[in-house]
Image (spheres, helix red, strand yellow):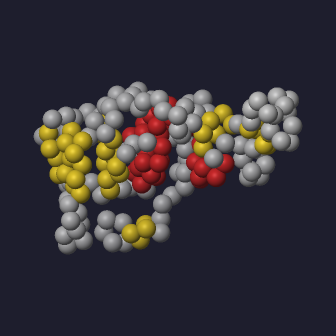
Amino acid sequence: PRSGEDGQSITLPVPGPIEGVQADGAPGDPISEAEHLDGVGVVVAGAGIGGSALATVLAQAGLSVLVLEKETEYRDRVRGEWLAPWGVVESKRLGLYETLLAAGGHHLSEHRTYHDSLDAARTPLNTVDLRGLLPEVPGPLCLGHPTMCRILSEAAGAAGAKLLRGAAGIELGAPERGRRELRFEHAGSTHTV
């Protein structure tokens, strides 16, 4: 259980798969004058794999979530190309596993090391069976980093989180009466939450 905005205990549900999630890669719409940020209960800094998964679960639990991402599009980087088996277990628990599979995710069953000093044939010295690391997981889940980030940020939006890409100048103020003020820039304007 976690403490909600009113100080009462809340229990995060085990959500189901996110239906109809598609990655469009578009930046968040600018915040209009009429849009109020006063009701934001949680601000997540970063709409990568972790931040977007967190935002999805919190929004599904009924919290008002604002996600601030500095990048306007997800760049291809050599990282986050696979979820470790324990991450696969968590993605299933959070209801995000099927969404990642539908986006092209696939499991890696073995790791083979290639080196001049090793025989190229499959041997116990150069091959690790990844299917046995956790009994209920067929190995790490592979999906390109930009795709995984886009899919999970789209899932956060589908769950009700507000995603703003291109956010800059994020400043967290000192605690005052149990709360903190957060300032950031987006689409040429400064906003306070």
**Residue pictured at 27% horizontal, 54% vertical:** 40
Instruction: Tell me if I can see residue 37 in this picture.
Output: no
Residue 19 in the figure: left or right of residue 71: right
**Residue pictured at 41% horizontal, 32% vertical:** 74
Query: Residue 28, percent across and down?
Result: 30, 34
Residue 41, image quadrant: bottom left
Between residues 179 and 172, which one lies in front from this camera angle? 172
Instruction: Tell me if I can see residue 183 in this picture.
Output: yes
**Residue pictured at 37% horizontal, 30% vertical:** 73
Residue 139 in the figure: left or right of residue 10: right
Query: Residue 147, percent across and down?
Result: 50, 31
Residue 80, image quadrant: top right
Q: Quadrant of the C terminus?
A: bottom left
Q: Is residue 40 above or below residue 144?
A: below
Q: How many marks?
A: 0
Q: Is residue 137 above or below residue 101?
A: below
**Residue pictured at 15% horizontal, 35% vertical:** 188
Query: Residue 62, percent across and down?
Result: 39, 55
Q: Is residue 147 above or below residue 89?
A: above
Between residues 104 and 146, which one lies in front from this camera angle? 146
The single residue placed furthest to the front in the displayed view is 117
Query: Residue 18, percent across and down?
Result: 51, 40
